[in-house]
Image: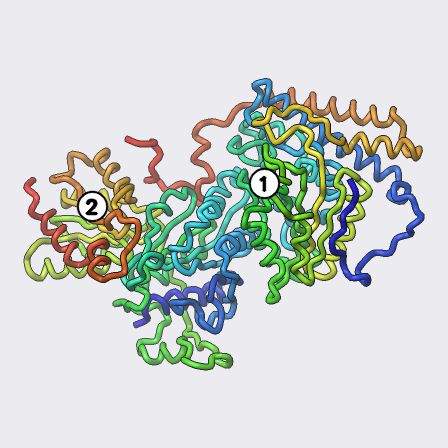
Amino acid sequence: MPAMPTKTPAAKTTPKTAPAADPYKKLGAAKLLKIHELMVRARLLEERLIKMSKGGDGFFWIGGPGEEAFNVPLGLQIKKGHGVNFDFLHLHYRSAAIVMSMGAAPIDALRQMRSVGTDPYSKGRNFVNHYAIPELNVVPVSPTIETQYSTAIGTGIAQARAKTDAITVVNGGDAGTAEGDFHSCLVWANRPALPLPILIVVVNNGWGISTEMKTQHGERNISDWAKVFPDMPGKTINGNDVIESWAALEEAFAYIRKNRKPYLLEARCSRLYGHSSSSGANRIPETDCIDLLEKAMAQRGLAKAADFKKIWDKEAAALDAAHKQVKAEPFPAVETVWEDVFADGLPPSYPTKGGS
Amino acid sequence: MANMAQAIRMALHYGEQNLGVTEIFGEDVGPPLGGVFTATQGLKTAWNAPLDERGIIGAALGLAWAGGRPVAEIQFVDYIFNVIDMLKLAANGHWSSGGRYKTPMVVMTPTGSGIHGSMYHSHSFDSIASKLHGMKVVCPSTPIDAYGLMIAAIKSDDPVLFLKPKALLRSKGEELIPGEPADEKLLHEMIDAPLGDRTKWKAKWPKLSDYTVEIGKAKISHPGSDATIVTHGRMAPLCLELARRFAAEGRGSVEVIDLRSLIPYDWDAIKTSLKKTGRIIFINEETEITNFAEHLIRRLVDECFYELKVRPRLLAGKATPGIALSPNLEYFIQPQAKDVERAVSELLADPA
C-alpha cells in the first residue's frame, strides 16, 4: 500500500532526515521490540475478547485488530497525563492498541467485556473497548459514530487558550467521515478566530460495517479534505507499516505542538476480524502488520524468531492469568444503576420503580 | 426591574467573575449582537461560533471534560433537534463512565411560543428534554429565578439545560436581583448595548451577589387551598395572574406551583399541595401526546389516588406538527389565558 501524500507542512517545519539511513535501524531494536510487544499485547487482547464474546463470557465485541502498526506509535507519542497540559484523546472502539501503549491494563478490558462490577471504565454498563480514563485524558468513548470529532473541538479550545504544547487527538474510521461531526471538526479546527491544536486521525480500513468505502465515497483520499484549509496539512499513509506510521505521527505531532494548528492524517489499515460480532468476528486474509514488522526486523537482524515467540508467550500467559482473575470477580449489584445518574447523587423523590 | 434577558446576562457576568466561566458561546452570542435576545451582551468571554449546533454542543462537552464550566447556546430550541444524540452524550457521560467524568456544562436555549415564531421559532422541548436522563432541566418564569437558576446551573457538576421562555425574556419581575440598581433606566444605561456602533462600548456591571435557586426546588408562587396548578415557563405568569384574580373575585383559592426545575422535579411540593387541595391541573405549552406532565399525573394516580377528589387534568398544546403563524391558529394551538381560566374553572367546579 503506497503512501499517498496530499499536502505536507511547509519545508521549514519538516524534520530533516538522512535519506540513506535505514529507518528500522534508526528507530533501533529496543524501540522496535517495545512497539512489537505492545502490538502483540493489543492483538492478543482483541483475540481474547473475541473468544470471550463467542464463549458466553461477555456479549458484543467490537475492536481494532489490524490497526496496531499505527495505533501503537500513536499511543507512544502521546504526552501522557491529566489536564490541559497533557494530550487529550477522543477515541473510538478500535483504539485498544492506543490505550495499551499508554499503559492501560489489559485486565480492565476483560472486565468491561465480562461486564463485571470491577470494570473501571463503565461499571459494567458499556460495551468493551469503551474507555474512560481521566488520569490519561482519555475521554469517554461512545458507541455513536463520529461524535468524538465534535467533542474534540472542546478540549482543542481549552488547549488553544492554555500556554502549553499539549494537543488533542481524535481518532475514528473512514465510514464515519460521512457524518457532519467530521466536517464540524475540520471547520472548527480551522476557524481563523481560534485555530485548534488537533491531530485529526482517520483510520481507513476500507469498510463501513459491511459496506465498501469505495461504493459510498468519491474522495481519492480522505486527507484531501485538508486541501481547502490553507493551514492544515493532510497526509495519507500506509498504517500497516510501523516505520511509516511512526514518522508520519512524529511529523504531525511536531507540527501541531509547535504551530498550534490542526493536522489531518489518514492511515490505511487492515481490518483483520471484520466489523464486530455482528459480522462474525472471524479472521480475514488481509495484511497482518505484526507479521510485516517481524519479517522486517528479522531481515535486518534486529530480532530473531525466538525473541518474538518469547513476547507472544509472555503476553498470552499474562492474559490467561488476567482472564482467570476476571472470571472470579462479581457482577455489579443492581442497586448500582442509581449511582452516577447525577454527580451530586439521586434526589430522594426520583422515580426508581420503573412504573406503577 | 431587570427583565429576564438582563437577569440572565447578569448571572453570566457573575459566573465569569466568580464561578470560573471562561467560555460563553453560540450563534451570534458574542459582539456585536450579544445574542438574538441580548442575553449575552457585554460579557467578556462571549464569542461567536460557526452556525453548527453539533459543534457547539461538542465543544461544550469537550470544554467540560477539560475542566471548564462552559455555557453554550442553541439559538432557538427549534434548532436543537439535530443535536439530541450529543445531548444524550452529555447526559449519560457521568453514568456511562462509571462516575469518572463529570460534565459541568450549561446549554441555554430560548423555548416555547408567544412571539409569532411560526414553525421553527415556537417549539417546546420540555418533554424530550425530560427523557435525557442524567441532564438537569430548568425553566424560569421570572427574572430573579432566571438569575438564581443560571447561577445554580453554572455551579452544577451535571449538564444543565436552561430553557429560556422566549415570550418572557422581555418581561420584568417583582423582585430586585441582589445588586441590581432600583432605577431601571440606570440599569439600561449600564448593561444594554447602544444601537449603532458598539465597537467601543463596554458594559458597566453592578456589584452583583450570589443568589442560587436550588435545582429541583419548585416555588409556590401563589398559595391556595381549593385547587393546585402545576406549571412552568411561559404559562406560569398566566396562572399566577389567574390565581390572584380568582382570589380577588372570590372564585376560588388556587395554589400555583412554579416548577422551575423539570428534572429533577419537586415531587414533594406537588404531593403536598395535592393532599391539601385534592384538585390538580398541570399546565404547560408542550403538546399533549406524551407530555411531561402525563408522567406526573400517572405518578399521582399511583401514589395519591385516594387524595384526588376529582380527576387530574392537563392543559397543554395541541398535537399539531408545528405552531402556525397566523395568530388565530397559534392561539388555538397553544394554551392562552382564556384557556387557563376555562380549565381551572372546570377543575374547581368538578363534582367530587
A96 left or right of B17 in image: right
Whether residue B128 is visible here, answered yes or no, is yes
Task: Check disc 2 and report the residue beneath it.
Answer: B314
Asked if labels 2 and 1 share a chain, the reply is no
Q: Position of residue B277 (x, y in %)?
A: 14, 45
Quadrant where the N terminus of chain A lies?
Answer: top right
Residue at the spot 47% in from the left edge and 42% down from the top edge: B92
Q: Which subunit holds the residue at mark 2?
A: B
Quarter of the image holding residue A334? top left
**Residue sitting at the far top:** A55
Residue A94 point in image, percent of width and height? 64, 36
Image position of A322 (left or right of B40)? right
Taking depth in this image into account, of B244 and A311 the one nearest to the observer is: A311
In the displayed structure, would residue A80 be above or below residue A330? below
Question: Where residue A132 is drawn, which disc sits there?
Answer: 1
Give yes or no for contact between labels 2 and 1 (Cβ–Cβ under 8 Å): no
User: How crowded is the residue under tag 2: few (<14 C-alpha within 10 Å), some, or many (20+)?
Assistant: some
Closer-to-camera residue (A108/A48): A48
* Mark 1 surroundings: few (<14), some (14-19) or many (≥20) residues within 10 A: many
Q: Residue at x 56, y 23 (%)?
A: A58
